Structures are given as structure tokens and as C-alpha cells.
Image (cartoon, rainbow, N blue to C red):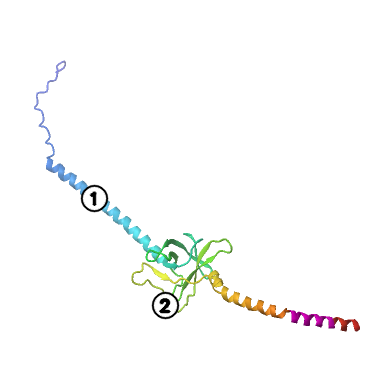
């Protein structure tokens, strides 16, 4: 009716029932379960990718240890490893050998296709006169047996050979001996008696030349 105030006389609707506590806990548990499963899948996928990457690296590179008894001053991590002068890898570690401190353990990383056999040796060589050392691999035979890690070894060990400088020093005593013999023979050649004979020979030659 115009001008009249509408008065609502109907009954108010009944309030909606609240979720029960058990239902809310069940919903929350489902969310936690789904979240945990999702996190586990992500972590598993990440570990799988890391495993594939490591496996690929292991297939691309091979690792060996070399035990040097002398000083390795001038050899640094990331230094060159060469096979017959060709760079095939790098030095990964330079440490005192844990089992015998009289040796220095050098771990190298080389291309997996580098020929390393039981006949292979490794030595330290200089880059010219710079004083910087590098590892030289040599002595491999095409038909040799591959060098493998033995029981108790983390990686295979390449025997250490003598460097060119060490071989030079090793031959020094023989060289000094030969030099001593040469000096002795020269001293015999130029003794007083021989000097007199040489002087007479020169005088005779001069006389003959003057008479011609």
C-alpha cells in the first residue's frame, strides 16, 4: 500500500551449519599430503638431472692419480696435462699423499679417449724457462692393457717417471767422469816434452818454408 512501511513478517532463515572440526582436519591433511608429494617429485627430478649430468661428465673424462717423490714446486691446480705434447686435461688436486707423506699425490682429469695403459708413465716437465710445470703422459702402447684401479684405490695410479731435467741430472756423474778423462788426456798432450816436440816441429816447418 502506498505510504505504508513494509514490515517483514516472514520467519528468518535458519543459519548455515559450520564445517565440523573433523572435516577441516581432513582437508588440511589432504593439502599437506599433496604438497609433500609435489615436493618429493620436484626433489626426485632434480636428483635425476644431477645424476645424468654426473654420468655424462664421467663418460667424458677419466681420473688418475700420480705419486711424485720429489718436489712439485711450480705445479698448480688447473695446470696442463699433456699427452706427447698435446693438451688432454688438467690437474685437479695437488696434496700430500695420506698413506705416505714422502710422496705428493697429483690427481689429473683427462679426456676419456686419452690412451692410458699399464705401460704409461707420467712426469713433470717445464714450460720453457718459465718455471711452470705441467704433467706429461708418455710411453703408451696401442696394444697395451688399459690401466685400471686396483683394490683399495679410488682411481687408477699412473707410475711416475723421470723428467727430462731429472734424466739430465742422472747422467751428470757420467758426464763429469768423461770430462775428467778428456782433461787428463789434454794435460798429457800439452806436457813439457810434447810442447818441446811441437815447438821443434814448428821451427822445422818455418825453416823449410824459408828455404823454398
Question: Does the stretch in magenta take in 202?
Answer: yes
Residue farthest to the top, as pictured = 3
Q: Is residue 125 visible?
A: yes
Query: Is 93 positioned to the left or the right of 33 in the image?
Result: right
Task: Place residue 198 in its image quadrant.
Answer: bottom right
Q: Is residue 111 visible?
A: no
Q: Which class describes the residues within 10 Å of circle 2: few (<14), some (14-19), or many (20+)?
A: few
> In the rendering, at what x and y percent does residue 102 appear?
42, 66
Dot in front, 2 or 1 = 2
Task: Place residue 156 in its image quadrant.
Answer: bottom left
> In the rendering, at what x and y percent does residue 192 appear?
74, 79
Q: Secondary structure at mark 1?
A: helix
Residue farthest to the right, as pictured = 211
Q: Secondary structure at mark 2?
A: loop
Q: Is residue 187 above or below residue 99?
A: below
Which quadrant of the rendered structure holds the N terminus? top left
Task: Place residue 106 in its image quadrant.
Answer: bottom left
Residue 36's label in the rendered image is 1
Q: Is residue 45 above or below residue 100?
A: above
Which of the marked residues, 2 or 1, is nearer the chain's N terminus? Answer: 1
Query: Is 211 positioned to the left or the right of 147 in the image?
Result: right
In the image, the segment drawn in magenta is 192-204
Name the residue beneath numbered marker 2.
145
> In the rendering, at what x and y percent does residue 195 appear?
76, 79
Type of secondary structure dominating the magenta stretch:
helix
Q: Which class describes the residues within 10 Å of circle 1: few (<14), some (14-19), or many (20+)?
A: few
Residue at 87% x, 82% y is 207
In space, the residues marked 2 and 1 are separated at their CA atoms by 51 Å
Question: Does the stretch in magenta take in 77?
Answer: no
Amino acid at each position: 500500500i502506498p505510504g505504508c512501511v513494509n514490515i517483514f513478517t516472514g520467519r528468518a532463515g535458519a543459519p548455515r551449519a559450520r564445517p565440523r572440526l573433523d572435516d577441516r582436519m581432513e582437508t588440511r591433511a589432504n593439502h599437506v599430503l599433496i604438497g609433500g608429494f609435489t615436493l618429493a617429485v620436484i626433489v626426485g627430478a632434480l636428483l635425476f638431472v644431477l645424476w645424468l649430468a654426473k654420468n655424462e661428465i664421467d663418460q667424458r673424462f677419466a681420473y688418475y692419480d700420480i705419486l711424485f717423490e720429489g718436489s712439485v714446486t711450480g705445479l698448480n691446480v688447473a695446470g696442463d696435462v699433456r699427452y706427447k705434447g698435446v693438451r688432454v686435461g688438467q690437474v685437479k688436486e695437488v696434496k700430500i699423499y695420506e698413506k705416505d707423506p714422502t710422496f705428493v699425490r697429483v690427481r689429473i682429469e683427462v679426456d676419456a679417449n686419452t690412451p692410458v695403459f699399464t705401460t704409461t708413465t707420467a712426469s713433470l716437465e717445464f714450460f720453457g724457462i718459465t718455471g711452470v710445470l705441467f704433467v706429461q703422459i708418455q710411453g703408451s702402447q696401442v696394444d697395451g692393457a688399459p690401466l685400471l684401479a686396483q683394490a683399495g684405490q679410488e682411481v687408477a695410479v699412473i707410475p711416475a717417471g723421470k723428467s727430462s731435467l731429472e734424466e739430465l741430472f742422472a747422467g751428470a756423474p757420467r758426464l763429469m767422469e768423461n770430462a775428467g778423462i778428456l782433461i787428463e788426456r789434454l794435460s798429457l798432450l800439452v806436457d813439457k816434452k810434447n810442447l818441446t816436440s811441437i815447438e821443434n816441429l814448428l821451427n822445422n816447418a818455418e825453416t823449410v818454408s824459408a828455404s823454398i
